[in-house]
Image (cartoon, helix red, strand yellow):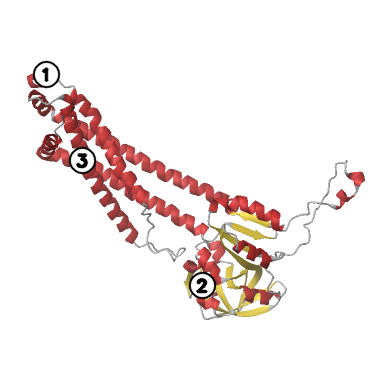
Amino acid sequence: MINWKVLLGIAKTHLLTKMKSTVTAALGVTFGIGAYITLVSFMTGLNQMLDDLILNQTPHIHIYNEIEPSASQPVSIYDEFSEAWNIVHSIKPKQSQKKIHNALPVLTYLNKDNKVKGATAQVRTQIFYLSGSIELGGNLTGVNIEEEVRLSNMADYIVEGTYTDLMNNDNGILLGAGLAKKMSLKPGDRVQISTVDGNIFPLKIVGLYQSGISDIDNIQSFANIKTVQRILGEAQNYITDINIKLNDLTLAPEMAQKLEKQFNVKATDLNEANAQFETGSSIRNLITYAVSVTLLIVAGFGIYNILNMLIYEKMKDIAILKATGFSGTDVQLIFMSQAMIIGVIGGVIGLMIGYLLSRLIDQAAFETEALPTITTYPINYNPWYYVIGISFALVSTFIAGYFPSQRAKRIDPVRIIRGS
C-alpha cells in the first residue's frame, strides 16, 4: 500500500533542500504560462477591437434596390430569335426607383421575426456640403438614431455631442469629423446642404461622428430620417435601405437569399460585403493561436529539461531511498509528486503574473486621432485562456516528470553507490 504522507514528505524535503533548482524549475513554468496569458489576451483583444470596428458599422444583412441591367432584353420577346445567338451592345440599366417597395410592411415583418435582433430603416442620398466658398460632395443618411445606437453602438462613434441632441432636433445633423475639420466647423455651427436638384437647406451641427475610417469620415453625415425625407421632398414611406441585425450571425447568408426572393430586392449579407475583412480576421486569429501554441511548446521543453536535470542531480538520493526499502514505484511517485508540485505552484503564479501584466497593458494609454473612442490597449480576459494555461502547466510538468522518473524507477542503487 502506498503511504502518500511519507512520499509527499520526502518530495517536499527534496524540493526545499535543492531550493535553487526548485525555484529555477518553477520559474520556467511561471514565465512560460505568464507569457502565454499576456500574449494571447493582448493579441485576441486587439483582433476583437479590429473586428468590432467593422462589425459595429456593418449590418448583418443590408437590403436595398440595386441598379443593374434588365435580365430580359427586348429581343427575347420575339419567338423567331429564341433559337438564335443574340448579341446586344450597350445595355443600359433599367429605370427603377431607389426606394424599397412596401418598405414599412417589410420592416414590420422583419421586426416580428424571432431570428432578427432588430431592423432599421435608412434614407441615403448624395449631397453637397456648403460652408462659405467651400463645397464638398458627400452622403447624407437619414436614420432612426435610437435604433442605430441600440443595434450598432453608434453612440461610441459620436465624439462631440450626444445622440439625444440629434433625436431632439429636426434640423440637426451629425457631421463627419473629417468634413468638420476640412470646413472648420464645430457643434453649434450651421452648414448648408445642397441636393442634386439644387435645393439648399441649412442644418445645425449637433455633434461630430468619427468611425475611425477616414474615407467614411470625409463624406458621411447623419440626420433624422424624417429630416432627410423632407429635404428630398418624399413621403414617410420613402426608404432606400433596411439594415438588419440578427441574433445569430451565421444565419445571415441563408436569410439574405430568402429575403431577396421574397421581396424582390437586393440583400447583401455580412460575409459578402466584407469578404476581405473575413479573410484578414481569420489570418490574424491563425497567427495568434500559432504563436501561442509555439510559446507553450517551447515552455514545455524548457520545463522538461529543468526537471530532467533536477532528477539527475538526485541520483544518490534515489540510490539511498531504494537501499532503505523504497520500491521503484515509490521513487517514481516521489519525483512525479515533485514535478506536479512545481507545476501547480509555477502555473498559479504564472496565471497571476499573466493577469497582472494584462491589467497593466489594459491601463496603458492608447491615444490615436483615428480612434478617439479607444483610450487604452484592448485586452481579452477570456477565462478559457486561464484554464488552458493551468491545464498546460499541469500536463507539461506531468510529462516532464514522468519520463525522467521512469528512469529513476529502473536505477540500480548498487551501481550508483559504487559510482558507476
The amino acid marked with disc number 3 is Ile
- The tag earlier along the polypeptide, 3 or 1, is 3
- Residue behind mark 3: 342
Residue 188 in sight in this render: yes
The amino acid marked with disc number 1 is Arg
Q: Are marks 1 and 2 in contact (CB under 8 Å)?
A: no
Residue at image coords 16%, 31% = 2
Q: Name the element at disc 3.
A: helix
Q: Name the element at disc 2.
A: strand
Tell me which corner region of the image, top left, top right, bottom left or bottom right, holds residue 195: bottom right
Please state the horizontal and vertical placement of residue 229, each as a whole percent of the image: 67, 74
- Residue behind mark 1: 415
Residue 420 in sight in this render: no
Q: Residue 208 — which label?
A: 2
Q: Residue 89 — which label?
A: none
Residue at image coords 20%, 40% = 342
Q: CA distance from mark 1 to mark 2?
A: 82 Å
- In front: label 2 or label 3: 3
Which residue occupies the foreground of this view, 266 or 139?
Answer: 266
The answer to whether residue 350 is left or right of residue 45 is left
Please state the horizontal and vertical placement of residue 271, each as a whole percent of the image: 57, 51
Q: Quadrant of the C terminus?
A: top left
The answer to whether residue 308 is left or right of residue 270 is left
227 over 14 or under it: above or below: below
Please rate how many residues cluster around mark 3, counting C-alpha atoms within 10 Å: few if below 14, some from 14 to 19, many from 20. Answer: many
1 over 217 or under it: above or below: above
